Amino acid sequence: MGKSLARCWQLYVLLALPLLYLIVFRYVPMYGAQIAFKKFVITKGIWDSQWIGFDHFVRFLNHPKFYEVLENTIGLSFYQLAATFPFPIALALALNYVKNEFFKKTVQMVTYAPHFISVVVMAGIITQFLAPRTGALNKLIVLLGFEPINFLAKPEFFKSIYVWSDIWQNIGFACIIYLAALAGIDPQQHEAAVMDGASKYRRMWHIDLPGIMPVAMIILILNMGHILDLGFEKALLLQNPLNLRSSEIIDTYVYKIGLTSTIPSFDYAAAIGLFKNVIALILLVSVNKLAKKLTQTSLW
């Protein structure tokens, strides 16, 4: 062990920083998760606050908004997963057969660049684009002879606006992994298929898709681990009193309960967040086990 450490000390130094990051920002904060089981009082601190067990969880389960918030979160999460998962694969397969390097790099840059737009700017772009009077989409609708639509005021449109704007923003970035996987496929398979007269579509179906399927399954499993972790920023920025019935998700509810309410309830908010993470963990383990059984590909 000592000789190995002395011989490869540079690698251990490189490992130290990300390991320190995981410990400080991922594992140490777990200490504070116990306030989900306590009646937290700031002046008493975490250890001295009264232990109340699962009272906060029961309170959330019995809350009138529980089913609405849970339904919105699960519906939006699975809608996003179903819509965003296949598009990067399709883009990667299409770009893989483009011969013109300039066009290929241009498409990559155009689809990749929106990923670096901040959530606040993205929400502003969406709001301006869909504005009832000045938005580009409504101007087109008026030109076609129809009445303008206040999209963000209609709850039935919120999920689609959220998901398809996310696809536009992140499709290019997600595509990079699949392009790397496609580059690792043995070219001799394509050469043999071309000699046999296989079309591009046949080569995609019988060579490319099976070649990237292990990577796709790993990404799908990882995405399932974040299935309820939508983040509150974008949903909160696109939220208004008119679409609240569809836009109120667990993350925005926790944000309002824990930070913006008149009397912040950190313990109750922590319990809701822990409840969400336990569900995500169950889904992650279940999907990993199912993927291992069906495709022989899994995280562990």
Image (cartoon, rainbow, N blue to C red):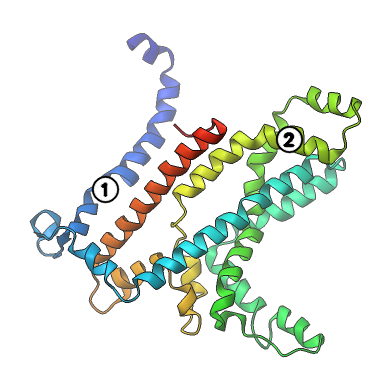
Answer above or below: position of 260 versus 55.
below
Picture residue at 69% right of the left edge, 85% below the top = 134
Marks 1,2: beta carbons within 8 A: no
Residue 156 versus residue 272 in the image, above or below: below
Q: Which residue lies at the image location 65% right of the left edge and 79% below the top edge?
A: 130
The residue nearer to you, when weighing 24 against 173, is 173
| 174 relative position to 45: left or right | right
Q: Position of residue 167 (x, y in %)?
A: 63, 59
Mark 2, residues whose alpha carbon is within 10 Å: few (<14), some, or many (≥20)? many
Front in this rendered view, residue 43 or 75: 75
Say which amino acid is labelled 2.
Asp
Sooner in the amino-acid sequence: mark 1 or mark 2: 1
Residue with the mark numbered 1: 30
Residue on which disc 2 sits: 208
Residue 194 screen position, x and y as percent: 88, 29
Quadrant of the rendered structure where residue 162 is? bottom right
In the picture provided, is 21 more to the left or to the right than 194?
left
**Residue 58 sits in which quadrant?**
bottom left
Residue 27 relative to residue 168: left or right: left
Mark 1 belongs to which amino acid?
Answer: Met
Classify residue 219 by image quadrant: top right
Residue depth check, mark 1 versus mark 2: number of the one nearer the observer: 2
How many dots with numbers?
2
> Can residue 181 be seen?
no
**Quadrant of the drawing holding the N terminus:** top left
Residue lying at the far top of the rendered structure: 3
Position in image of residue 27 (x %, y %) = 30, 43
